[in-house]
Image: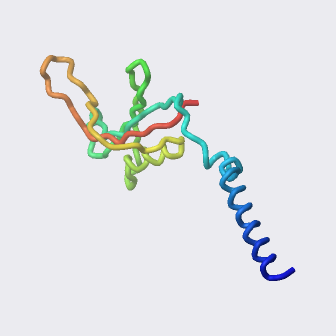
Amino acid sequence: MNRRNYLLTVALSLAAGLAGHALYGPLAAPTAARAEPRRDAQYEYCAVVKSQAIATPRLFYWIIYFKEEGAAKTETVEASLSGNSQAKAIAKLGEDGWEMVGEGPLDVRPDPRPNAPGTTTTAIFFKRRKD
């Protein structure tokens, strides 16, 4: 085979390869790479806040699980004397599959009286997919 035929064969092979990749490359991509988030995904939410009810020198933190009906379930987290209750609460949520999504104010104990000041504290918010 002379040099001209060799170069023509290489050029045609490259062109065919590029055309095949352009046409069928996206079809061969792994499913995970092309997956879009589910639009109907349902999440559940919770927050970690400093306890407002227990008056002791030790710091306690609450994990507040928000329910669809507007109710909330509260779990108190207490660390050992040398530990950190907030870190323990965050680590617990991480082990349970919760993902941290933000930080902001949360009115923990709203006063039912009209125009009464609320007790607003900073919360760390989490979410995870419902099973």
Q: Position of residue 35 (x, y in %)?
A: 60, 42
Name, please, the residue furthest toward the left.
115
The image shows residue 41, relative to residue 77, as above or below, that is above
| Left or right: residue 104 compared with residue 96 | left
| Left or right: residue 114 compared with residue 109 | left
What residue is rendered at 28% in x and 34% in y?
106
| Left or right: residue 43 compared with residue 107 | right
Residue nearest the viewer, comparing 47 with 22: 22
Q: Position of residue 45 (x, y in %)?
A: 43, 33
The image shows residue 110, relative to residue 103, as above or below, that is above
Q: Position of residue 58 (x, y in %)?
A: 31, 46
| Left or right: residue 56 compared with residue 7 | left
Query: How many dots with numbers?
Result: 0
Name, please, the residue furthest toward the right.
1
- The quadrant in which the C terminus is found is top right
The image shows residue 109, relative to residue 24, as above or below, that is above
What residue is rendered at 42% in x and 44% in y?
100
Q: Position of residue 57 (x, y in %)?
A: 26, 45
- The quadrant in which the N terminus is found is bottom right
The image shows residue 16, relative to residue 94, as above or below, that is below
Splitting the image into 4 quarters, where does residue 105 fall? top left
What residue is rendered at 40% in x and 53% in y?
83
Residue nearest the viewer, comparing 67 with 75: 67
